[in-house]
Image: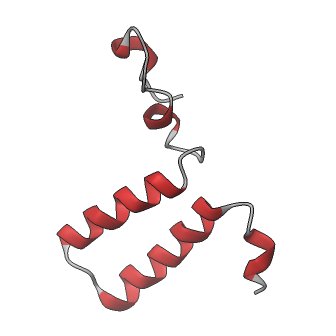
Amino acid sequence: GNWRGQAAMPGLRIEMMTRNEIKDKRWTRPELTRLGTMREVAGGGFAGNDGNTNCSGKANPTTDCLPS
């Protein structure tokens, strides 16, 4: 496909690339952990990461850091 059309969605692009690379190379667990961290940083606003991105600076982490 034409990946240039996905330029505004770097998190999605990285996640799809990561899945393919894991399948092809059968990376070990430490490498999967590192990739997961990279994907969360790059795709901060995407589904599943709201709890992480909204947590910083909250006065009450117990309630404010819950995933949406």
Where's residue 60, x and y in %? 38, 9
Against 28, residue 40 (above or below) is above
Q: State the image coordinates of residue 65 (x, y, percent, origin top left).
A: 41, 23
Q: Position of residue 30 (x, y in %)?
A: 18, 68
> Is residue 39 or residue 57 the one in the foreground?
57
Q: Residue at x 40, y 9 (%)?
A: 59
- Which x, y percent locates residue 28? 20, 77
Residue 22 position (above or below residue 29): below
Q: Quadrant of residue 45?
A: top right
Question: Is residue 6 shown left or right of residue 32?
Answer: right
- Taking the spot 46% from the left edge, 52% from the top edge, the residue there is 41
The quarter in which the N terminus is drawn is bottom right
10 relative to 50 in the view: left or right: right
Q: Pick the residue in front: 27 or 7.
A: 7
Q: Which residue: 47% across, 29% down?
A: 67
Q: Above or below — where is 58 with respect to 3?
A: above
Q: Residue furthest front?
A: 57
Residue 64: image quadrant is: top left
Give the quadrant of the C terminus: top right
Q: Residue 14 versus residue 16: which sits nearer the camera?
A: 14
In this view, which residue lies farthest toward the bottom? 24
Q: Residue at the spot x=42%, y=26% of the render?
A: 56
